[in-house]
Image: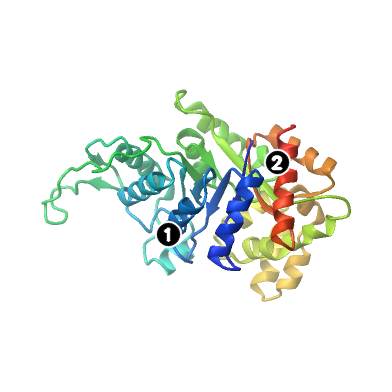
Amino acid sequence: MRISTLLSYAGGFKEAVKEVALLEKAGLDMVWVPEAYSFDAPSAMGYLAANTETVTIASGILPIYSRTPSLLAMTAAGIDYLSDGRCLLGLGASGPQVIEGFHGVPYQAPVGRMREIIEICRTVWRREILKHDGRYYQMPLSQGDGTGLGKALKLINHPVRDDIPIAIAALGNKSVEMTAELADAWLPAFYTANAADAVWGDALRAGAAKRDPGRPPLEIFAGGAVAIGEGLEDLRNLARPGIALYVGGMGARQKNFYNDIFARSGYEQEAEDIQNLYLAGDKEAAQAAIPERYLEDNSLIGSEGFVRDRLQALQESGVNALNVSMMGQTLEDRVKTCEQLRNIVDTL
């Protein structure tokens, strides 16, 4: 079971990369590099490639609307080259507020576009001449579009790998089904072991039934914050601001994917209450409305026995890779937490 974490560079990017290098030695297998509407992820991924040795470097995630499919493929191939085969291309649709507000691109047909992008990327990595006549992308452009001078080309360089792993950050049923069919990894949000089958089970099974048997099993990343020891339960409350932000305010009232997942996980009334409070400006009340039971189910914070039980529950629900955040006031504390988690995972 691989252990991954999200790169957090609020305290400085170069400092964050130094921390990843130490976590790598403590047992970290993979780091996700966020983008959203902050600095671009590929620049940071290249820097990580130069300052780490073994961790997989994943975009977490690149929005599919901000780059052409060919550029996504070129970027992944370039980072894979710099890192000696350690790149994972994490893709997602983001949401209308970011895509239309920050990028100025219509938020349309995310599932159909993602399906074509996966096909195009794999064609580019195999160094095949790129000819794609899809519903959303045409390479070269069709006659009557553009100048008519487009030429079918293939990637100049020889990639380190001709099949770079692709992870999808998917939430909706159609997107999750497509992920289970085509992708190499799935990065869900607000995943709880006891609700996973009710929320996503049908979609995962439908996609798996169409999956190419020649591809490895889908890697499913979930976990939460980690702190291992006695009397640490109050640390679970540190997740309240982030959960309230996503469930309450990440998206419009009528289109908030995270709120939908929270509601479908058995917290329908709480999801409505959190959103109403957050959008009314009462963030503290929105945080207080998050149930204690959810914080317990969505974290790895507690005694070693508690953490081991939660890991086993995640495994039984289908999770075969971890996406966690290491708790700790100091770098030394977070490295120790990573070592503790590694030791438990290796004995499951």
> Left or right: 292 with respect to 92?
right
> What residue sits 25% from the left and 43% below the top?
155
User: Mark 1: few, some, or many residues within 10 Å (few <14, many ≥20)?
Assistant: few
- Quarter of the figure with residue 1: top right
Depth check: give the residue in front, 278 or 215.
215
Q: Position of residue 118 (x, y in %)?
A: 38, 41
> What residue sits 79% from the left and 43% below the top?
307
> What residue sits 46% from the left and 28% below the top?
215
Q: Position of residue 211 (x, y in %)?
A: 47, 28
Amino acid type at circle 1 is Ser
Q: Position of residue 88 (x, y in %)?
A: 47, 44
Depth check: give the residue in front, 335 or 104.
335
Marks 1 and 2, how far apart in space? 29 Å
Q: Is residue 92 visible?
A: no
Task: Say what secondary structure mark 1 lies in.
Answer: helix
Q: Which of the numbered marks, if any, corresponds to residue 342? A: 2
Amino acid type at circle 2 is Arg
Q: Determine which residue is flagged by label 1.
A: 43
